[in-house]
Image (cartoon, helix red, strand yellow):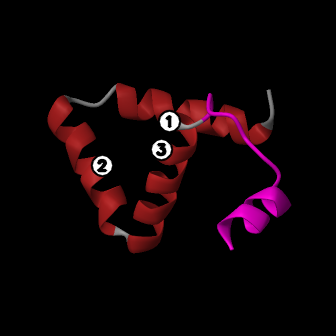
Amino acid sequence: MKTVESRAEVYLMAIQSLSKAEKEAVITRLLEDPQLREDILDLAVIQQRQGEPSRPFRDYLTTAL
């Protein structure tokens, strides 16, 4: 496991051990930061769309213009 993944696992376990109210407080604080909020939303969209087919960016440009 990479350092980033193991550190993420530690943070996740810490958050999971919190009460519901504490979890909500942590998530609320994360979402109050505009940059973190944007990152979280981007990651959520990526996660939701992982199974969708992809195409090369150049192909997209030729059909979008």
Residue in the foreground of this view, choosing between 41 and 10: 41
**Is 38 on the left-hand or right-hand side of 6?**
left
Q: Which residue is drawn at 48% across and 32% down?
A: 12
Check disc 2 and give the amino acid type: Val
Number of callouts: 3
Q: Residue at x 77, y 39 (%)?
A: 3
Check disc 1 and give the amino acid type: Gln
**Callout 3 touching callout 1 (CB < 8 Å):** yes
Q: Which residue is drawn at 69% across and 34% down?
A: 53
**Callout 3 touching callout 2 (CB < 8 Å):** no
Q: How crowded is mark 2: few (under 14 residues within 10 Å), some or many (20 or more)?
A: few
Check disc 3 and give the amino acid type: Ala
Q: Give x and y (percent) for residue 40.
A: 46, 53
Q: Give the range drawn in magenta.
A: 50-65
Quadrant of residue 30 in the image? bottom left
> How far apart, in angstroms, are the residues tagged by discs 2 and 1?
23 Å
Q: Residue 48 carries which label?
A: 1
Q: Give x and y (percent) for residue 39.
A: 51, 59
Pointer 3 residue: 44
